[in-house]
Amino acid sequence: MRSYSSLKLSEVVFFYLLIFCGQTYAQFSPDKTVSYGAASNNYLFPIRPGNTSIITGTMGELRSTHFHAGLDIDTPGVGSPVLSVQDGYISRATCTTGGYGNVLFITHPDGNTTVYAHLDEFKGAVGDYVRRERYTRKVSEIDLQFNPNQFPVSRGEVIALSGNTGGSGGPHLHFEVRNNNNEAINPLVYRFSEVKDHVAPLAFKIALKTMDSKSRINDQFGRFEFSVVRNGNTYSLPYPILASGHIGVEVLAHDKMENTRFRYGINYIDMKVNGQVMFTQTIDKIDLSESRRILTLMDYKALELKGARYNKLYIDDGNELNYYSTTQKKSGVVVDNTETPVWISLKDFDGNISNINFTLKPSKPVDETLLLGTIIKPFETEYQENILKLSVKTCLEEKGEIAIWQKGKSTPLDAAYRGKNQSVYLIDLQQYLPDSISTCHGSINYSFQDRIPSETDYTYYSNILDVEFSERALYDTMFLAVSYDTQTGNESFKIGSRLVPLHQSVSITLKPLLSYTLTKNLGVYRKEGNSYSYLPAEWKNNRVRFNTREFGEFVIRKDTLAPSISPVSVNATSARLKIKDNLSGISYFEATIDGEWLLMVYDYKTGYIKSEKLDKTKLLKGDFELKVVDNAGNEKIYKQKMR
């Protein structure tokens, strides 16, 4: 099994297994005359059919690293019967610590496959078969595929009990429908009477963003958020926004249903500018192999810094999603010499609509503006794509320019605009990659090392580290910053920015300047705040190589403490314990009873691990032993005699 600290990697691996293994065996002959949304397919609701259900998540909802691929159906705790929605056969069963946890796949005569995830246990013959296979193979995690004759099921048959396994945030059933192309389609196309929605989407804020260095919003460059005012299902900004040039629009909104506290995704968004449709987004199915490109649909910086999921109403670099019209404009709204009314429609699957409207008022760029706020620090730096925005507090000796230093040469640069107590400079990183910038308050040092092109294989080399980028790693050109220090007592390598998203992992080779005795407990960790995430790495010739899909600060340190094991209830009926590791995370565990392998099921969210007997009627008698090993190789053993 994978460790708690490695679960991000575990879930990614499991996610791709779901993508590429979902349609392995030959299926029933699809009925070509029936579309995936046809009512004649007559799918049954999988939980308490005929009763109004609470939905906790919808298909297409914006999650942090992927689109939600199905419905999350609330259950009253663990153990609700889960029903097959239509005749078919169980084509796959998977048990993992992270991801979907315990999950069943059922293939149907119409060619669709339905997915039932986070299950507590499988019922019937398939449950017995999976448990036997786990014992035969002596594994906790397992992925099995079946042929059409092994486990046929009927519409309404109980196939499992609902649970909270894997990466679930609470007891519920995650339910998906996938078509012949292994795309997730919206289960609501089957018009389940159990799901009721008469509530229109809710809007909260509009964000406006300058799309190039010549554009302005309220006389300034950057990204700015504005709260909207509600009147029924219409939202507006009570005042026009001054703007010029290319402006990107983003919206912070979510859908709702009556009598629930949960938030949902919005499947349909339209934007008109001057009465003309400029943007249309339709999410009615999800290509699971491209789900991570959600990082280009959302404003990634706002997500990382504020946890806010702003939907871009423009197509950004690296966005290859097929949710848009083929004639879609990439540049956003163009504001020229006339007032520009903007109208946005948000529509959920049931046709409930909310509208947002506001006006962009033309205002040519100015050298000085009263709309620019004050700053307290001598200078502030902000990045927006290829522009470095430097705000410098006004000095008495201010001459209105700074000097950009690059490879020993300086270039003066005048302010783009000024306010009451600051001047703002816009540095194009495609033109300048500064080592430092001198201001009237002193110099600012930068650690830029290279420009990394997107959509190409590229390797950055240096005397302290190398970074290998595949052609699909970056969504846009990256301006790589690298720094090194040992102030914390451990070697620290700062690589890139966590605000830059990666589509695929990059391979990093660190070249430590300190000497290490290579022991199994020496490892590489990504540091964020006071937390550390272990990264599997390979040492060779005092260099260490690892893969990561997140930039940030990486440190080399030792983990010398073994995991802890605390018994909760260990007796002849069952063994339940709590396990924990302080740094590198739990790598694997194994248990025996009188020397015979015993299946243990681990819930990383709570830290609890419990036994699951092959024969549920037999008692656990004899010497019980549980060994838990962390990623650094430290191990802990718990022993108890069962009577």
Image (cartoon, rainbow, N blue to C red):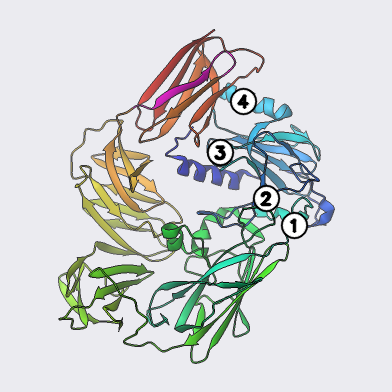
State the SS at label 2: strand
Q: Is residue 60 above or below residue 339?
A: above
State the SS at label 1: helix
**Which residue is labeled 3 in the image?**
166
Q: Position of residue 304 (x, y in %)?
A: 43, 57
Residue 133: give its label.
4
How many residues crowd around disc 4 within 10 Å: few (fewer than 14), some, or many (20 or more)?
A: some
1 and 2 marks in contact (CB < 8 Å): no
Q: Is residue 497 above or below residue 164?
A: below
Front of the two marks 3 and 4: 3
The quadrant of the rendering that contains the C terminus is top right
Q: Magenta stretch: give its range.
A: 562-574
How many residues crowd around disc 2 within 10 Å: few (fewer than 14), some, or many (20 or more)?
A: many
**Which residue is labeled 1 in the image?**
189
Marks 4/1: CA–CA distance: 37 Å
Instruction: Indicate the amino acid at tag 2.
Output: Ile
Q: Earlier in the sequence, mark 4 or mark 2?
A: 2
Marks 4/2: CA–CA distance: 34 Å
Residue 357 visible here = yes
Q: Position of residue 564 (x, y in %)?
A: 39, 26
3 and 1 marks in contact (CB < 8 Å): no
Instruction: Indicate the amino acid at tag 3.
Output: Gly
Marks 2/3: CA–CA distance: 19 Å
Marks 1/2: CA–CA distance: 15 Å
Q: Answer with left or right where residue 413 lies relative to residue 329.
A: left
Instruction: Indicate the amino acid at tag 4.
Output: Glu
Q: Earlier in the sequence, mark 3 or mark 1?
A: 3
**Which residue is labeled 2 in the image?**
55
Q: Earlier in the sequence, mark 4 or mark 1?
A: 4
Give 303 or 374, whichever is nearer the viewer: 374
